[in-house]
Image (cartoon, rainbow, N blue to C red):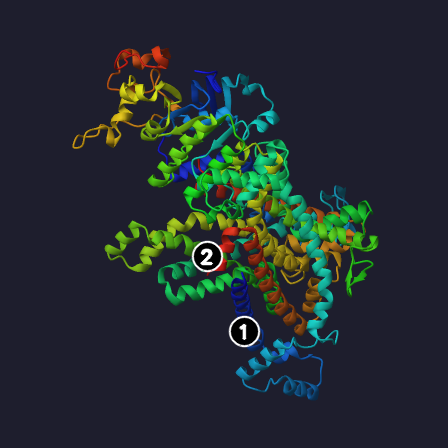
Amino acid sequence: MSAPVLSVRNLVTQFDTRAGTITAVDGVSLEVGPGEVLGIVGESGSGKTITGFSILGLIDKPGRIAGGEVLLNGQDLRKLSDRAMARLRGDRIAMIFQDPMMTLNPVLRIDTQMIETIRAHRDVSRSRARDMAAEALALVGIPSPVERLRTYPHEMSGGMRQRVVIAIALMLEPDLIIADEPTTALDVTIQSQILSEMQKLMAERNTALIWITHDLTVVAGLAHRVAVMYAGRIVETGSVDDLLDHPMHPYTRGLISSIPSSVPRGERLVPIKGMTPSLMNLPEGCAFAPRCPQASEICRKARPDRQDLASGRGLRCFHPLEEA
Amino acid sequence: MLAYLIRRLGQAFLVMAVMATIVFFGLFAVGNPIDLLINPEADLAEQEETIRRLGLDKPVHVQFGFFLAGLAQGDLGTSFVHNRPALELILSRLPATLELAFLGILIAVVLGIPLGMIAGLKPEAPYSKVIMAGSVVGFSTPNFWQGLMLIMLFAVFLGWLPAGGRGDTVDVLGIPVSFLTWDGLSHLILPALNVAIYKMSLVIRLTRAGTAEVALQDYVKYARARGLSPFRVVGVHVLKNILIPVVTVLGLETGNVIAFAVVTETVFSWPGIGKLLIDSIGLLDRPVVVAYLMLTVFLFVMINLVVDIGYSLLDPRVRVKGGRS
Amino acid sequence: MTADTPLRRFVVDFLASPLAVIAGLGLLAIALTALFAGIIAPQNPYDLAQIDIMDGSLTPGTEGFGGFTYWLGSDEQGRDMLSAMIYGLRISLMVSFVAVSSAVTVGMVLGLLAAARGGWVETLIMRIVDIQLSFPALLVALLLLASLGKGVDKVIIALILVQWAYFARTVRAAALVEIRKDYVTAARAAALPQWRILFGHVLPNVMPPVLVIATVQIANAIAIEASLSFLGVGVPITEPSLGLLIANGFDYLLSGRYWISFYPGVALLVTLVCINVVGDHVRDILNPRMQR
């Protein structure tokens, strides 16, 4: 693999609340190379979205990044000034949010929002920026892009809006795109269209992509590698085929057996028992221990460290399901 | 947009008609119209002549017809004291009130919106707490007392500004205005501040609440994620969204400003319609009171109309809805 | 955790803000001062035997001929301003309290009626509310009093007439939500008479928003009464409220005798700030969107 575009090491993000400090992201490390798609999978509250925002440096009070490194092409983003970081956002790293209805400003036209993005990063004229915006809309398959530019977000369908947001992300040819559940709010048919287009565009442009989702099936079709998050930590990581075929963490296996298409027709689905733990009071040992069928004494006492296995697998578990 | 405008004008006309009816039956039918409309000092022959001229010997529905007919022609009776048509009298005083109201609102908006946004964006900062404390005090201070304190401080103790009156005016398109001469402006500052401080507190509270809510929206975070400058995020993405509620309330408050001008104008002897109303109530000059009432209703209806149109210009979602239906 | 009743949680939340606690205590002190004005005030400002015209227009802190210290000065007639203020406070608070509680009653009955009956009754009541609320309360009260004449009772009537609409609107909105809930259906199924459902079941549940608005409206009533008295259409000179005291001092202000207007105004301001701070805080606590 060539040098990673993004390399995150031991990232810790905490929130100071009245009830105490919550560690939402706890020692997360990950890497993405050019043209590579990394899927981050986890339930809501697992810290996957906070991880995305932490990379962009968009953690607001009472939250703060408490430790770790975020290296973009070898440069530590945490050492950059606010201004330098703002110059980078939207230009080198673009982000796509979950809900296209909520992402675009409802009172500003599409062209206003696209042109302001371009002109925040490129010294181009207004008309040149407008042309670039129209090209970007055409690229993501929006018909009659020049007319579309003059519309307001509410005049478009949800799928169309998400395409606009994707166009904005691609427009300045970033090194990395972080997409946070961008297709969750869309219809299944539109979801699959957008997925295949994204995959194609990433490959063509050699852009790194982090795809944050709760849906393993989306990751299975899209990502090269997967990181599974649970309670702020990455519990298992590996290439998508390897990880899906041979899950080693009981949580990963639980996730896979919860997918309807993963079990033969007529057999029962196997849901994971219990509830996602509250970050306010995590168990002392492994966060998954209370729900884990394999859990033993040690799981309730100590937190498993990250083990790096062969072929790029990573794991945090005392009792892995199979040896690699 | 045109259909929307026509529909709103129709509604405005309807409210005017309803209010005219209420004023008629409230002030004409319930009270004794002879007391209300005839100079009590007139002799008997004069009274009978007036009763006949005004049609007060006719049945109620006929009188109502006369009232409406007069209203349609802008005839709201004649002031006993000034011996001029009441409406004309009020209209001659209106520019002074409007000048006061608009300057007051202008000050309130120009200072209130930025202060409210600061307090909304950094609610925990000490300066935000000072702003909010100031707005609670401004909100709680009775208008007339605040006016007295302004006079006490700036006119009596410091002697910087005059305590009352309007000062020199200059005619612009036939309308006398104060703000173009130093003397006029110096008379205008204190009353305008008096109007502005209360409104400003209101604007600060509204803006802060709106900003705190808008700042949490995804589109604001997304604007930051696109690397826009903080100035653009706050000045365009946040501001444009909070303007909608602020403009709505402010527009509706314009009516309140005109009403509260009664107090400010009394304190500062400002020769506007509010002072005229208080003087007319004191002198039992009832046609002027009735005319004031009808004109105020008209202004309120118009303000509501303008606010609704302004609202639809600011919020594209409303514009579409209005245009379709 | 101890038993967490809504009331207990409300009290705990309220005590969490030191500012609101101070304002609440201030309000209590103001109310007690007004209630026991006869005992607390150093002088009865309306007992002519206690007033000495020789002590007229004394500056604050001056000792008069009778050895009486006028801490906040005296007015033209030699009346102790501190005492006049305490009595004035009593009138201001009494007027607004009576007016708002009556307005709450009227508004609540009409609001419940509108919500329960629906149809033309609701349309009529709510149209009147809409029209009334589109005009400023001060102006409506001013014009009402211009035709009614001066008097404490008339000020109260005018305040009720301008304030009932706020409560009617709030009660109707809250009651409409409550009426659709299951417990009302259950009470209906149990064939309870409608008035018992409304007053026994729905009413207690619409009280929180009514209380919030009532707090704000008491502050408004005090301010409106003061403004009306200042404009000369409010309380009569024989029963001066804080507003009338300020108005009386207006004439002396330009000659530098500021204290006649200044201190009653400060008393008015402190009262209103306390009410507004308490009201703001109560509203924040009861607002479900603010709850964490």
Q: Amino acid at mark 1?
A: Thr
Give the side of residue B210 with respect to residue A263, left or right: right
Q: Counting other residues with Cα less than 10 Å from the Cα at mark 1, is it few (<14), some (14-19), or many (20 or more)?
A: some
Residue positioned 64% across, 63% down in the render: C233
The front one of B209 and A162 is A162
The front one of B281 and A265 is A265
Q: Position of residue B178 (x, y in %)?
A: 78, 57
In the image, residue B294 above or below residue A301: below
Inter-mark Cα distance, 1 to 2: 24 Å
Q: Are marks 1 and 2 on the same chain?
A: no
Q: Quadrant of the C terminus of chain C?
A: top left
Q: Position of residue A283 (x, y in %)?
A: 34, 19
Residue positioned 67% across, 77% down in the render: B77
Q: Which residue is mark 1?
A: B21
Q: How many numbered circles are shown?
A: 2
Q: Which residue is mark 2?
A: C169
- Residue C95 occupies which quadrant of the picture? bottom right
